[in-house]
Amino acid sequence: MPLVMLEPLADVFTAGVGHYGKFNCLKPFDNPDEDFYDGTMRHLTSSQINPLAIDEQDGCYHLAKVAFNCLVRLHHCMNEESFPGYVESLLEKSRNILDKIDRDVDRNMKREELSD
């Protein structure tokens, strides 16, 4: 990969060192998938109209921050032992929501039957 393409990522990393500390992006996070997805979407939204939009906080391109967040998210998801547990917790939450919807639908159907 041409190094010139990595320069904006290096700028993001350098800005992050000043803000968060050196190699902070590699430390364990409680929910790395969610944290870095949120950061990705926030910066993607900021660059939606202008792909060259710059984050006023540190002078880095928002799209470079999108790329950096995606790489860090991928790293954590590939390497964090907690990631399978995180995915399982999301699946469990989804099951609980679907169960609640089923119960609500059943309750409403019974009400309609009683009112007829």
Image (cartoon, grey):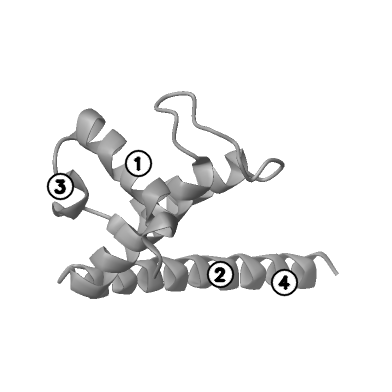
Query: Disc 1 to disc 2, how far (Cα)?
Result: 52 Å
Q: Which residue is mark 4?
A: 109
SS at mark 1 in the image: helix
* Residue type pointed to by label 1: Asp
Residue 29 visible in image? no
Q: Earlier in the sequence, mark 4 or mark 2?
A: 2
Q: Indicate the position of residue 17 as horizontal and vertical percent values.
A: 21, 36
Sort mark 1 into few (<14), some (14-19) or many (20+) by Cα contacts within 10 Å. some
Sort mark 2 into few (<14), some (14-19) or many (20+) by Cα contacts within 10 Å. few
Which quarter of the figure has residue 92?
Answer: bottom left
Q: Nearer the viewer, mark 4 or mark 2?
A: 2
Query: Disc 1 to disc 4, how far (Cα)?
Result: 58 Å
Label at residue 11: 1
Q: Which residue is mark 2?
A: 103
| Residue at the image point whose x is 33% and y is 67% from the top | 74
Q: Nearer the viewer, mark 2 or mark 3?
A: 3
Q: Earlier in the sequence, mark 3 or mark 4?
A: 3
Viewer-proximal residue among 85 and 22: 22
Query: Disc 4 to disc 2, how far (Cα)?
Result: 10 Å
Q: Nearer the viewer, mark 3 or mark 1?
A: 1
Residue 31 visible in image? yes
Q: Nearer the viewer, mark 3 or mark 4?
A: 3
Label at residue 94: none
Which quarter of the figure has residue 47?
Answer: top right
Q: Indicate the position of residue 49 as horizontal and vertical percent values.
A: 72, 42
* Residue type pointed to by label 3: Phe
Query: Disc 3 to disc 4, how far (Cα)?
Result: 56 Å
- Vertical comparison of 50 with 33: above or below: above
| Residue at the image point whose x is 25% and y is 29% from the top | 19
* Residue type pointed to by label 4: Met
Q: Which residue is mark 3?
A: 23
SS at mark 2 in the image: helix
